[in-house]
Amino acid sequence: MRTICVIGTGYVGLVTGVCLADMGNQVQCIDIDPRKIAALQKGQAPIYEPGLQDLLERNLRAGRISFTEQYPVGLANAEFVFIAVNTPEARDHGADMTNVRAAARAIAEHLDHDAIIVNKSTMPVGSGDLVQSIIASHLARPSVHFSVVSNPEFLAQGAAVRDFQRPDRIVLGSADREAAGRVAELYLPLRAPIMLTDLYTAEMIKYASNAFLAAKISFINEIARICERLGADVKEVAAGMSYDHRIGSYHLEAGVGFGGSCFGKDVQALAHMATQAGLHPQLLYSILEINQDQRRMLVDHLITLLGAVRGKTVAVLGLAFKPNTDDLRDAPAIDIIQSLRAQGAEIRACDPVANERTRALLGEDQITYWQTAYEAIDGADAVMIITHWNEFRGLDLDRVRGLLRRPIVIDGRNCYNPLDMAKAGLIYRGVGRGQTAALESSLPTPLAAISHASGVATMDLAPRESADIAQPVMGE
Ligand SMILES: NC(=O)c1ccc[n+]([C@@H]2O[C@H](COP(=O)([O-])OP(=O)(O)OC[C@H]3O[C@@H](n4cnc5c(N)ncnc54)[C@H](O)[C@@H]3O)[C@@H](O)[C@H]2O)c1
């Protein structure tokens, strides 16, 4: 059992805190937000993340985790001090280190014993040195000895608890190998590969990983645009690519693009670091540009099918930036709703867990909020699927057709088979779906059967009558 202090109780800090407590450690969490601390002390997780609430309650009951606004209380006897505060995008597109600086300074002012400082926030290369120098220059008790270890977090929201408990790897960077080794011991029960390296390299691994994942998404979205023009189906293309183990299937899903608090700001921050170093990171800029265009493209698709949206009603399914989270930071749905509202549309919004947060962010002007997809769709002129929550992936299409005033579906996540949509009488526009429907109708039966048997098909390749694939006529 170790005593651990975690600074910042957001998506990363809170998950880190409860998971480390669940591993038998004594965890003391600090946050400057009094509302968060009050809720957490009562056992209420201020964010939605599968499994988090249960872990929080269990470890509070066991007395293994506590929450405070007071640094001296949170730091008391802590052998490890994790910094997990937010590092948002700054005005110049670099990482805003204000919160890290404040946390480092507060540690320096209140630490009264030796400790290892663990940088868990995503921080630019060189931040380990920065934290080291801030603490060293403000130490209230100069006899205190400390070391800094970079331990970037790779969890994905929506699966944060699982990712923390079953990480692909743990990265630890430090000039002090002994300190890094002691942090490694904390993670041994997780039985994950542990990589020890230097501070700069550990910091860069985090940025490079996020940039690579974002690049995969923007890459397949660019391919989707080409597919759309040339008549190929990007879902099939991605499936075909993914059998190559050098490529894999993760993040190879064309759609509305990435959102959330990390990919965009981390790619920006990496590009900023590169330009500061005199480089021209053109690939990084392209990742961001393609991603931003995807949001505009979906609105354009809608206008192509529906005409001007002024005075029309659009149902938006999914508000959070991805399923299983209530996080709206850089959520594509928010940009899309703002754009539609500015053009005079009425919005019927629906998200299983993010309605209230969206109401707080966007208010109720031209927006109503609905608990179920069918309520949101009822009477709308079109529906846009923006977040692929499971409950939006298996809609009763006949019911959808019956509820919509005009049968238009814009699928920003390619949840549906264009053939099924056409069959249900819906005018469907996915992302990069080309002409699969037309091609399928001409597939000879044996080939369709082979595709099924081998599991290669991601779409239903059963032969259909040509009437099935006829596109419904626009409008009513
Ligand atoms: N969210 C993710 O999926 C994710 C994944 C990996 C890494 N990261 C990185 O982890 C860091 C935290 O991200 P997050 O999403 O948890 O942020 P968050 O905004 O959800 O939480 C940050 C918390 O830190 C608190 N805080 C700010 N300054 C403080 C201070 N001086 N002292 C104490 N508390 C303070 C805030 O009140 C807030 O509760 C960021 O650097 C982020 O890039 C995030």
Image: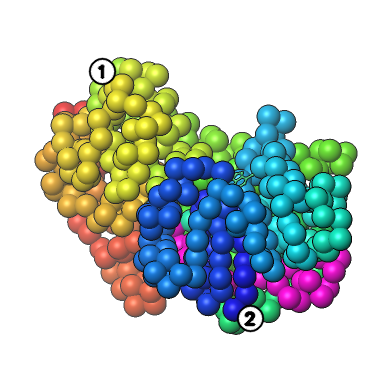
Quadrant housing residue 453: bottom left
Image coordinates for residue 166, horizontal then vertical, percent: 53, 74
Residue 188: mark:
2
Q: Is residue 99 left or right of residue 34?
A: right
Q: Amino acid at mark 1?
A: Gly
Q: Amino acid at mark 2?
A: Leu
In the image, residue 164 lies in the stretch drawn in magenta: yes
425 left or right of 10? left
Q: CA distance from mark 1 to mark 2?
A: 59 Å
The residue at which mark 1 appears reads as 311
Instruction: Kindly state the secondary structure of the residue where label 1 is placed.
Output: loop
Which quarter of the rendering shows the C terminus? top left
Residue stretch rendered in magenta on the structure: 158-183
The numbered dot on residue 268 is none
Q: Is mark 1 within 8 Å of ligand 1?
A: no
The nearer-to-camera label among 1 and 2 is 2
Q: Position of residue 230 (x, y in %)?
A: 49, 44
Badge 2: residue crowd in 10 Å (few <14, some 14–19, many ≥20)? few
Examine the structure image and report whether residue 428 is included in the region drawn in magenta. Answer: no
Query: Which residue is at 56% across, 61% downward?
Result: 28
- Residue found 82% across the figure and 61% down from its top: 144
Secondary structure beneath dot 2 equals helix
Left or right: 172, with 340 as reference point: right
Q: Is residue 321 visible?
A: no
Of the 4 image quadrants, the one containing the N terminus is: bottom right
In percent of width and height, residue 257 lies at: 50, 45
Is 338 displayed left or right of 11 in the figure? left
Q: Nearer the viewer, residue 15 or 335?
A: 15
